Structures are given as C-alpha cells and as structure tokens.
Image (cartoon, rainbow, N blue to C red):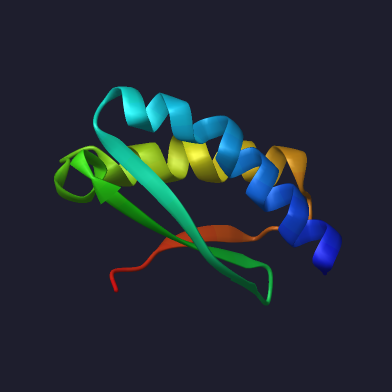
Amino acid sequence: MEKIIEKINEIIDELRPFLNLEGGDITFIKYDDGYVYVKLSGACAMCNYQDITLKENIESYLMQEIPEIKGVINVSL
C-alpha cells in the first residue's frame, strides 16, 4: 500500500500546477479501500466545475495510472 500512496502523491504533484494556474490546489488526505480522498481548495473549492475536474481529470488520470484505485472522493475538512 505504501507504493500506491507514493504513486498517488507523485501524480497529485504532477496535477497540482494545473490547478494552481486557476487559483486552486489539491491535498492528498488518505487512501482507503481503493478510494483516494483529497481536498480541493482555493478557487477549486468554490468552482462550479469542481466535480468535472475531480472526475474527468484527477480521478480518470489516477485510475489510468493505478488500476487498484476505484475512485476519488473530495472531502471538506
């Protein structure tokens, strides 16, 4: 599981600059039972397109790179 978490963090680090360009950010929270929990913040937290960003960009890329991932969940802390 450590290797999966390491790879998740690498991918999130690759995606972060694209979110930063729009004033947003992403934080990895945890990986549990095949699901990646993240927190979208900044402009992403209030964007009307956050679900699209999460599902079509972040989730699809993570699932493509790491087959064990079942989905990505945005949490608000």
Query: Could you tell me which residue is drawn at 85 percent across and 59 percent down?
Result: 3
In the figure, residue 27 lies in which quadrant? bottom left
In this rendering, the answer to whether 8 lies above or below 16 is: below
User: Residue 39, position in %: x, y?
Assistant: 38, 59
In this rendering, the answer to whether 17 lies above or below 32 is: above
Does residue 31 appear to the left or right of 44 in the view shown?
right
Q: Which image quarter holds the N terminus? A: bottom right
In the figure, residue 6 lies in which quadrant? bottom right
User: Residue 36, position in %: x, y?
Assistant: 57, 62
Residue in front for this viewpoint, 32 or 15: 15
User: Residue 18, position in %: x, y?
Assistant: 42, 25
Q: Which image quarter holds the C terminus? A: bottom left
Does residue 28 appear to the left or right of 34 in the view shown?
left
Query: Could you tell me which residue is drawn at 59 percent across and 31 percent down?
Result: 14
Q: How many marks?
A: 0
Does residue 64 appear to the left or right of 38 in the view shown?
right
In this rendering, the answer to whether 14 lies above or below 76 is: above
In this rendering, the answer to whether 31 lies above or below 49 is: below
In the figure, residue 55 lies in which quadrant? top left
Query: Could you tell me which residue is drawn at 57 percent across and 70 percent down?
Result: 30
User: Residue 5, position in %: x, y?
Assistant: 72, 60
